[in-house]
Image (cartoon, helix red, strand yellow):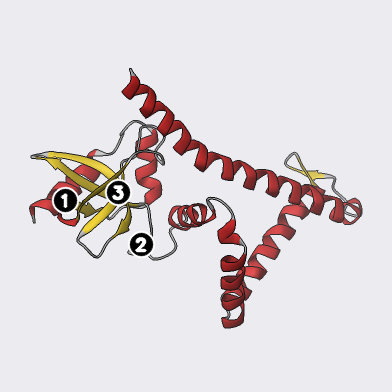
Amino acid sequence: MKRFLDFATTTALGGLLVVVPLLLLALIADDMLLMVEDLVAPIAGLLPADSIGGASMATILALLMVFAFCFLFGLIARTTIGSRAGGWVERSFLHRIPSYGLLKTLSQQLAGVGDDDESSFAPAVLSVAQDTYQLAYIIEEHEDGFVTLMIPSVPAGLAGPLQYVREERVRRLDVPLALMLQSLQTYGVGAGEFFAQGREAHLQ
């Protein structure tokens, strides 16, 4: 019973660390959208239509403006000056926000951008025993030939215990994080191909 309670508590806390920052981000985005809606309301009132598809023109204009600003800042970030400024902001402010690094890594991987070889939460298969394998995330690789793994829970997907194992017992999977996460959230549906890929890699 104690082992189950410890497992349930650890899993719940792990999920909480992921959910709370996402909720805060959603609340901030909602407040920002409402603020922009107030700014564009006079312009929306001049348009012939009040709404499109059930959404008010003020909301549509606000979404377009937010997207335009994000696109503009994205272009600036691709320049040398923008990249240096963005790095300074991250180092000075953003990395002090709890779970910012985690959210950044996960968002990059779920969007299919970033360097898969250097990112955390890289999908992998762990060889547990003869002909027995387990899905895992590679969190960090170490120079001593070991890797830090997170064993995902089902259906949480992004919460679970950590393990420190030898590198030869682990094989990276050539699958997107979003696909593996979807399988975990559906209690392993489609995971057979992941295990097969990991098994073939171990046998090579």
Q: What residue would you read off at disc 3?
A: 149
Q: Residue furthest bottom?
A: 80
- Residue 169 has which mark? 1
Secondary structure of the residue carrying numbered label 3: strand
Can see residue 107? Answer: yes
Q: Residue sitting at 86 percent across and 50 percent down?
A: 38
Decide if residue 149 is on the left or right side of residue 131: right
Kindly identify the amino acid type of the residue bearing the numbered disc 3: Leu
Which mark is first along the chain, 3 or 2? 2
- Residue 116 has which mark? 2
Kindly identify the amino acid type of the residue bearing the numbered disc 1: Arg
Percent of width and height locating residue 144: 21, 62
Which class describes the residues within 10 Å of circle 1: few (<14), some (14-19), or many (20+)? some
- The number of callouts visible is 3
Can see residue 193? Answer: no
Decide if residue 75 is on the left or right side of residue 132: right
Decide if residue 186 is on the left or right side of residue 71: left
Camera-side residue of 195 and 19? 19
Percent of width and height locating residue 14: 45, 38
Which mark is first along the chain, 1 or 2? 2
